[in-house]
Image (spheres, helix red, strand yellow):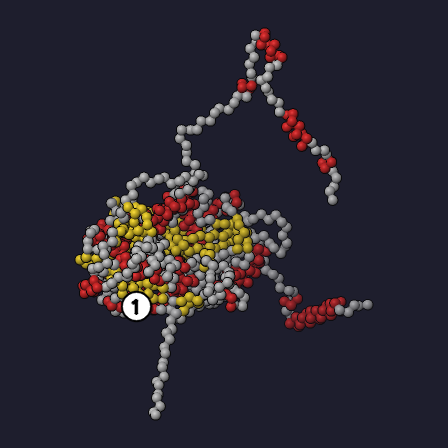
Amino acid sequence: MVRLSSILCRSRFARQQKQAFQRKGVYYVRNSPSLSQGILQESGANVADPRPEINPPPPEWIPPAEMLDDFRINFPPPQDHRKKDKSIWHLSSRISLTEGIDQACLLTKTQRFNGLPPQIERLVDKYSLTNQDEKIKDVIRHAMTWNNTNKKLPRRIDFERPGYVFTREYGIPNYKSICIMLENYIRLSQSFGGAYPELTASRRLVCKPSIETSYEYQNETIEIRALNDYIVNDRRPLNPLGNDQMIAESVNHELLDMYPVSPTVDLLRTDIYEDLNRGAFKEMLRIPCSHPQIVFRINSGRGREANQAFNLMTTFGIAITEARSRYGIGMGKLEVPVTIINMNISFNRINYIVFQLNTMDFDNDEGIKNLAWFDSELMFRKHPCKQWLEADNKIKPAVYNDYNKKAFSKFLALYLYDYVN
Amino acid sequence: MIRRGSNLRKYVQLVSQSCVRNNQHLASVADNSDDAHYPKIKPKYPPGKWGNMDPRHAWMWGREWEQIAKCRTYQEKINFLTEHIHKVWVYNSIETTPNLLPYKGGVTKTTVKEVRSLEADDGNLSAWPSVYNSVNVEQEFERMKQLTIEVLEQVENMNHDYLKRRELKQMHNIPGNCVIYLDYKMSRVLISSLLTNILGNLGGRHEHILNSHYDENSTVAAFWNKDGVENFKMFKKVSPAYLRKQSATFFGEQAVDFHIRKDKPLPEFASLTDDVCCKLTYDKSMLDYYPGVLGQFYDHKQKKISQGYTIGDPCKFTHLNVIFPNNKAMNLVSRYGEDCRLDAETGYLLSTGFLTTLSQAHALGFNQYEEITYPFTTQTILTDGQNFTLSAYQLNTTQMWKDDEANELQNVLWKTKSMKLFEKYENGKVVGFNDELFTMLLKFLLIEPSDRNGIDLSPNIDSYPEKQEIDDVKFDVFVEKPIIYESV
């Protein structure tokens, strides 16, 4: 119920006033002749209109000669009028090769071997740290539980229970865990410098080096761009693993035949303005430790085959830049092959690649081939909590088991190759 | 008529009590002892030193002290301390308001010692801690120097276009100079290259470096109470049971860029009986001001303790922190002038050292109720890749809520001036390498932790959670039974 007050009872004239103004409020001054004006004209007086002097009109706006760029407006990018050199095939970390390692071997003219070379297999389990297993398990615990990073993790999907909605989890992201494991593995491997001083006398670890290079494959240019996590450099290169007999026998090896599909089907077509041949360093020979030996990379979330294929291409790019710095451009068969080791880590798996560049002739698929050995080991298994089975529906810590000591033993053997007997 | 029930019960109680009293009286008369006549009188203060504190506040602290002393595991203590949401003053690592270094030192009860030279103790209170005299770096110096120079040259000659490309993508629509972020990334790449190479090299010959844990971007957080700071204004009526505390609560949180931890603590830089720890010389001039007047903000927060790792890690003691000055807050402060920037850098070193040691102390069972039994020490380096400022911090007390009369200990920060590791790059080569500074950096890395003469490092905690087991991989082995054929 509304209380009656004087404000409620007052009369309202607002609408009537508005309507009255619309009808009668506007007075038009027309230049119609009036009696007084006529009388003044007859008498010869000058009649002037005072309105322009009382209310002069605003000046006309002239835009300034130079306008500042308005950051609120999206301007289109300036057109690049440089002469395009050519269009090339581009390989980057976003691309996945359909045929996997075989396609990468076709693009790099490589013969594939499964397992590590015999010279490195002999070093596995021959050298080890004191309490090695306990130290590696501590590394895994450090990466998975002891680090106090508390970031929002992506919502989990478990195929055992497809529709189940897990509660939001906070913890260590996978990428951070892998970084911690890789750093610790490298530091533990470097500790052998106490027993073998040559390991640390001239070897240097470079953080986050990038590779940008290109090469001619059957009259087409392929550009390789990759950002690596670490590269181990030294004053001298690694000794080749494949002997002359293996290189000679590689002539008979047949590469994958993808006809009628082109091997460059998965690569992106881009335009470039300059040829790139940039290794990790601007001028390789000026720096003392500039021969790359080992490449470490952290993989993004792809399958094992796709990761190995991309890592083979990046290792190949590094080998090409090293070969060009030694022998120049236009070389066919190399006098001394270039050997590069690649170790790439996914969440709980290490993949190993040993690549030997024997030839820079990619005009056809015949002739001697490059050599590559592939291997892989699972480090451990992680069993996350099955929340739907818990009585209070709360998430409990994950369980880790199936620790595989061979993973680090192979890592160490590859690190120590060519520096120990 | 007496109602049965409660009245009868009360009557019976009164009678029984008087009987007991009479009996006690009779017993005491027989024994000639006076104690039974009077109940125990509560003393003015609980056991311990309380200075000029209000007795009601002292008894409140004492009661909470007894409760937390009953908790014998880390988790129980932390749950007791961080149970409720409180109104706290936020303690910033880098103060964007200038001239607040005395405030930062006063609130953390820290005195700042500016060290002019890296030469050690000559009886001067402002000299660098003498512990570093005993660290021998002669064997490693030449090799590490050559390695450092080569790493510096490599990083300079490396292709950093990917950093600049990402930089442009992030900052293209904001006008102005965005060099600060690029500088930070370049410094980070340089320092991580140096640390990975040097630590890897030294790990082969020094067991304590091999077994240390190395983290990046770890968060440290701690809270504490400080006496003498004006507390929040209370506008609503409070019950007599809830007393307004004399001391104000502060909370600090910070990310340390590089964090090295070991399983034993660093040796103490100064004894607790030394003048630098006992003679209170920390600056109290700004404690009279209400913190809001000094540009400080408060917040309702759940108290948090974070020591840079989760419990279970055997490496509990901080050995070395590395922090970078090229960030937005430091850039803002540097607009006030060079002096303000230097003060802000000192404050940054102070807060890093204080927060890491205080959170470390909490992880070992100490807190503001249970005082530390040995000083906690840490080292901090502030660098942008070329300019280095070294500091050493010693935490002597966690009971900062007691006044100076009750608690005569103070915390100490030793700090050097900013020094260049090398002058410049010329044609890709390092020019003007500073041997003296590099010797000190090596000492920072090579100083061995000590077990502090065998004392119990965590006397208030009975046991820590055990390490999570990781079982070895199992292989299935099939044993086939031999087939025996029956003769036909």
Q: In this image, A226 relative to B406: left or right?
A: left
Q: Nearer the viewer, residue B151 or B225?
A: B151
Residue at image x 35%, y 48%?
B163
Q: Residue at x 58, y 52 (%)?
A: B244
Residue A67 location, quadrant: top left
Pinpoint residue B82: horizontal percent, then vertical percent: 52, 58
What residue is shown at x 65% (from left), y 65% (from top)?
B38
Q: Can residue B211 be spotted in the picture? A: no
Q: Quadrant of the N terminus of chain B?
A: bottom right
- Quadrant (top left, top right, bottom left, bottom right) of the C terminus of chain B: bottom left
* Residue picked out by circle 1: A128
For this orientation, the residue located farthest to the top is A43
Q: Residue at x 61, y 14 (%)?
A: A34
Amino acid on which disc 1 is placed: Ser
Is residue B287 something one can see in this rendering? yes
**Up-down: is B409 above or below B167?**
below
Task: Give percent across and percent down for residue B472.
Answer: 38, 71
Which of A25/B214 is in front? A25
